[in-house]
Image: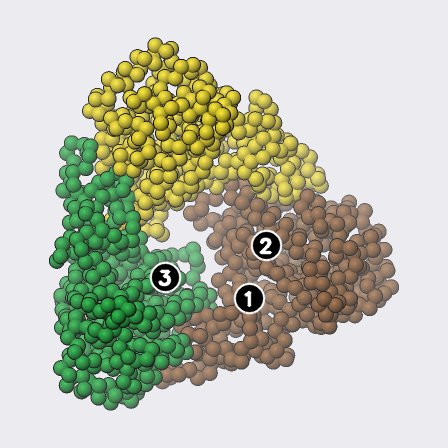
Chain colours: A green, B yellow, C brown
Amino acid sequence: MSANMKPDIDGLIANYNDGYSLQQDFYISPDIFERDMDSLITQRWLMVDHASRIPNKGDYFLFDIGNESIIIIRESDDKVNAFFNVCRHRGSKVCLEHEGNKGLLTCPYHAWTYELDGQLRPPRLMPDGFDRSKFGLHKCHVKVFHGFIFVCLSKDTPPDFDEEYSEFGEMLNFHGFEDAKIAVKRDYPNACNWKLVVENFIECYHCAPSHAAYCSVHPEDQLTALGAGPGSGPVEALEKYQPTWDEWTERTKKLGHPIPFIDRDENSLDLAQLSRLPINDRNFESETRDGKLASKKLMGKFEVCDKGETAFVFNAISYVLAMNDFALMVRFTPRDAVNTDVQLSWLVHKDAEEGVDYDPDNVAWVWDVTIKEDKKITEDNNAGILSSRYQPGPYSTQESRVASFVRWYLKSIK
Amino acid sequence: MSANMKPDIDGLIANYNDGYSLQQDFYISPDIFERDMDSLITQRWLMVDHASRIPNKGDYFLFDIGNESIIIIRESDDKVNAFFNVCRHRGSKVCLEHEGNKGLLTCPYHAWTYELDGQLRPPRLMPDGFDRSKFGLHKCHVKVFHGFIFVCLSKDTPPDFDEEYSEFGEMLNFHGFEDAKIAVKRDYPNACNWKLVVENFIECYHCAPSHAAYCSVHPEDQLTALGAGPGSGPVEALEKYQPTWDEWTERTKKLGHPIPFIDRDENSLDLAQLSRLPINDRNFESETRDGKLASKKLMGKFEVCDKGETAFVFNAISYVLAMNDFALMVRFTPRDAVNTDVQLSWLVHKDAEEGVDYDPDNVAWVWDVTIKEDKKITEDNNAGILSSRYQPGPYSTQESRVASFVRWYLKSIK
Amino acid sequence: MSANMKPDIDGLIANYNDGYSLQQDFYISPDIFERDMDSLITQRWLMVDHASRIPNKGDYFLFDIGNESIIIIRESDDKVNAFFNVCRHRGSKVCLEHEGNKGLLTCPYHAWTYELDGQLRPPRLMPDGFDRSKFGLHKCHVKVFHGFIFVCLSKDTPPDFDEEYSEFGEMLNFHGFEDAKIAVKRDYPNACNWKLVVENFIECYHCAPSHAAYCSVHPEDQLTALGAGPGSGPVEALEKYQPTWDEWTERTKKLGHPIPFIDRDENSLDLAQLSRLPINDRNFESETRDGKLASKKLMGKFEVCDKGETAFVFNAISYVLAMNDFALMVRFTPRDAVNTDVQLSWLVHKDAEEGVDYDPDNVAWVWDVTIKEDKKITEDNNAGILSSRYQPGPYSTQESRVASFVRWYLKSIK
C-alpha cells in the first residue's frame, strides 16, 4: 500500500480471498483502524476488568481505548458507572490518575464538579440561562455481569447484553466470579494492529514452534485439535483427541459440574464461545508448571477439582480462561492502527491469601511467559507485513478459527 | 474528527457556537494549524526578546516558530536585523547555535558568507552571470520598540507597527525598558495547541482551583474581577472590586504615575490591551512571595513604588507584565498543531546586580510555579479534547476574555 | 510546501530550474519519496555488501531499504540468493537477526521452512489442494560481480547487469576484490532525504569549509578540479591540474596498471563513472593521515604502489573508492522521506592480518571523520530546507556533477 493513499475499504472487503490472511491495508491503515473502531469496537460490549478492582464507593479506574478514556467508578455497592473522561466545560480530562478513589469527580482545571452519577453540580459564575442538567458527564454504557465489568462505547443503544451473554451465566456463576479478587495484573503493550493480536491468540498452529512453556502444560494432541478452542484445529486431530475429551467429560459430569457448549457462528454479533476441556491428560489440576493447584482455595462451586479449563470467549478482544482454582482475564485494547494494549489479570478466590494460599508468580507463570512470546511474534509479523511483497497467505487446518474470525470481521465492518 | 480527514475549516467557522469553546479540529488539526500560521501568526508583529540579549555588534539569537528559524542579529548600536536562517545557495541553516556572536554570517556548508545586513559577499566559483545582489539572506521584518524586539514573518508589507503600538510608548518608556536587562530566562515546552495556551492564560476562572501560589499574591476579589485583565471577569465582581481599584488609581495619580488604558475590540488587529492594577490590597510592592520588592533598583521613572502592575498585551502570544521593580516577558510560540513553546524572561534594571540587588529565583518565583501548573493543565486539556465525546462547552462569566479571543481568532483566520 | 498537501510531482519536474537545487518538496515529501522508490531505487542494481561477509553456506545478512527487508544468503560456494524477508504464510519476518547462519530458513512464527533456494518445504496441516511450489520466498534479483553483491528489488525484469557494468570488470579484477575481506564496517544514520546525502557526496565545493582531514590528504588543486570525480569541478581548475594528472597517468601506465575512464551521460541508466587519479602530488601512497600505506598487503595485481585512487561509481547510492592497499565501499540506503542509512565498509586483502598488516582505525580514518562531518552537514541542510523561504539556489562551477545528478534524477522519476 502507498503510505499516502486512502485505501478503498469496500473494494478490499469485496476482494478478500477466503481462507487467506487479510490484505496489507487491514493491518496498517489508519483509515481502516478508524473504520474498525467506529463500526465494530465501539459497537460491542467489552470486558474491561473485574469488579473487585473497585470495591468501595468512589473507587475508580480508567480504561483507555483508541482516543477515548473511560472513567469506571463505583457509585454504590450495587452500582458501577462509566463516563467519558472529558469535562463538559472546556474538555480537560477530569481524572488524571489511572486509578484511585473520588468522593466527587472534580475537574482539576476549573473545578467543575460531578456527582458519582455524572450529574454536574452548580458551577461557579455561569451565565444566566445555563442549564447544568444538560452538562453531566457523557455516559458510557456499563454492565456488571457475574463480577465482570463490561462497557460499550456506542453513542446509540448498545447491543442487548442479556441476549448475547445470559447463556454464559450459569457457568460464570459456577466459577464463583462474584467472589473473586485480582491476584496479579500485568500490561504488555504490543506494537501491532489489534487484529494481529487476535489472530495470534485464536490459533495454536504456532504453539509448537513458539511456546515451549505452554506446550509443557498442555498435551500436543489437544493443542492440535483444540489448542485455541473448539473449531480451531483440523477435524482429524479432533477425532483422535475426542476419546480423551469424552472420558474427561464423563468423569466431570459425574462430579455434577456443568459442561456447557456455545459456539456462535460467523453471522453472530460476537463470535462468542463457551467450552470446557481437560487441561491435560497427565492429571494436571491447574495450568501450572507442575500441574498442581496454584491456589489452595477452589473457586465457586468447585469442591473437587475436575482438572478442567473453561474458556469464555465474549468477543475477539475479551476472554476469560478459568481453572478450578484461578482464572485469567485477557483484554486486548486497540490504541491505534499499529498499537494494541494487552492486559492480563489473574483472579483467585476472594478469601485466598497471598503467600499462604497462592504465590502470584506461580498463578501467572504460563501465560506471562506465553504472552511475552506472543508480543514478539505479533510485532515481527507486523514488521513483515510492511513489505511490498507481503500478500495474504493460506491458513492451515489448525487455523480454522482465524479464518472464521476474518470472515466475521469483514462482515462486521461492512 | 477523523484523524485522516481534512476539516472543512470555513464550515467550522460558520458553525461556531458563540460563547462556547472551539470545536475539536481547531485544537488538533494540522490543516488548521497551517491556516493559523499563514493567515494569523505570520501576519502579526511578535515580541521575540529584549534587545539587551544582543548588546554588541554581531550578537545574535535564533527565534524558531513553526517550520521557520529566524536569525536576529545586531548590526550596529542602533540597528537590529532579522533574517530567515536559510542559505540562498542550497538551503542549509546558516546559524546552528541558538545564540552567539558573528562577525559575518558564514554558512557552514559551502562558506557562502553574508554581511550583517544580509548581503552576500562574492562566493567562490560561481558561473558567469551570477548576480550576488539577488542572493542576500531573506529578510524578516524587525522593529525594536522601547527595548523589545518584534518581528513579522510576512512575505508582504507587515501591519503598521506605529499605528498598532505607538499608544503603548509612554508607559513602556515610564517603565524604562530601554534600560532593562534579562535577569532570568526559562523555557517550558507545552504539548498542546497554541490556542489552548492562550485561552488558559487569559482567564482566571482556573486560578482558585489550580494556582495556589498565584492566589497567595493576588486577592481573590481582584482575581475574580480582573484576574486576566480588564474584561476577563464578571460585571458584578468588577463592581465589587472597583472601589479598591479606584483608591489605588487615585493614590497612584498623586504620585504622578501614568495610568493608561487601552482595550481594543474584537475587530482590531491584535486585541491589544494596556492597563494598570494594584498588585494586592495587602500592601504588596511586587509580585513576590512576601510582597516585598524583588529588586532594589526600581525601573524607569518609578522613584516611589506605587504597588501597581502594568499589563501590556501586544497580541495573543506576546505579553509584558511589569511591576515597578521587575517585569515578565511572556512569549508563546506555535511549533506544530499540538506543540507550543512557552518562554518566560524576567527583566530588571540594567544596573541591578545579581546577588546584591536581586535574587533571580525570587524574581521568577510566582510565574515559574504558575506556568508549570499551566503546562500540566493545558496538556491535560489537550488529552481530553481528543475524545469523540469532546464538544465545545460554555464559558463562565469569568472567561469573557477567552470568548472575545475566540471570536477575534475566527475573524482573523477567515 | 503544505505539510498536508500532495505535491504535483509532474508539475514540479516541469518547473525545475536547470542549474539550481531541487524544489523543497523533493527533499521532504513522502509522496515523492514513494515515487523515488517505485520508479528509481527499486529499478536499479544496488551494491549491498562484499561477498566475504557471507563466506559459508547458510551465512546471511539483512539489507533494509524503505519498507523492505531483504535476506541475502549463501546457498553454496558459487551461489548467493536474495529473498524478501516475508513469510508466505501470514507475513512474519522470517529472519529476525541482522546476520547469522541458517541451515534452513524457518519462520519463527509457525515454522514454515524454506530451503536456501527459497523453496517451501511441506508445511504441517495445510488443506487439500495446497500447492507449496507456489509459496516459495519471493525472490529478489541478485548478482555477485567481482566480489560485490548487487541486488535489484524490481518485480519485473531488472536492467541488464552486464550491459551496465561489464566495462568495470577489468579494473575491479585488477584491484582483486574477489580476494578481499571486510576490515571495518560502520553505520551512520542520516536524518535527511537520500538526495541530500548524494548531492553532498558528489561535490567538493564544501570540502575546504567543512573537511579539514580530507583536505590534509588531497591537494587543493585536485579537490577543486576533480574532488568529486571527473566533471565535478570547473574547467579552468581542471586545465590547471591536468599536467599533474597527466604526469601520474604516464608513470602509472609505465607500471602496466590500467587507467580506464567511463563517464556515462545524463541519459544513461545509472550516471555511472569509472576513473583513476593520483591521491596526492606529495607522494601519498594511500588515503591516510601520513600518506603511507594502511595495509602492508597490496590488493589484486598491484605489485608496486602507483599512488593512485580508483573511483567506481555504480550509481548514485553505490560507490567503491579504491587505493592500492585498501578500498572503501559507500552505501547510501533510503529509509523514508527524511532518513537515509549510510554504511561504510573498508576492504583489505583477504590475507592481511589485523594488528599485523593493518590497523583498522588507520584504514578507516579519513572517511570516518569525513562522513561524520557530512552527516551533520546534510542534517543541517535538511533543517534549513523546511523553511517557507527556502528556494532552489544556483550551483557553483564546482558542483557540476550535482547539476548532472539532478537532471538525471528528474528524468529517472518522470
Residue topped by disc 1: C63
Do discs 2 and 3 share a chain?
no
At a point 56% along the width and 32% down the height, the residue shown is B60
Inspect this view and state whether residue B40 appears.
no
The chain letter for the residue carrying disc 2 is C
Residue drawn at x 49%, y 72% is C95
At label 1, the amino acid type is: Phe
How far is disc 1 from disc 2 in space, using C-alphas?
Answer: 23 Å
Q: Secondary structure at mark 2?
A: helix
Tell me residue C271's x, y (percent): 65, 58
Q: Is residue C394 depicted above or below B292 in this figure?
A: below
Q: Residue at x 70, y 55 (%)?
A: C366
Please name which of the two marks, 1 or 3, marks the residue nearer to the observer: 3
Do residues under tags 1 and 2 come within 8 Å of each other at their CB atoms? Answer: no
Between C408 and A389, the one lying in front of the other is A389
As drawn, the label of residue A189 is 3
Residue B77 falls in which quadrant of the image? top right
The residue pinned by badge 2 equals: C409
Is residue A27 among what the camera can see? yes
Q: In which quadrant of the rendered view does residue A254 lie?
A: bottom left
- At label 2, which amino acid type do we have? Tyr
Amino acid under disc 3: Pro
| Image vertical order of residue C248 relative to residue B228, above or below | below
**Residues indicated by labels 1 and 3 sit on the same polypeptide chain:** no
Q: Chain of mark 1?
A: C
Q: From the image, state whether disc 1 or disc 2 is nearer to you.
A: 1
- Say if B166 sits above or below A208 in the image: above
Residue C134 occupies which quadrant of the picture?
bottom left
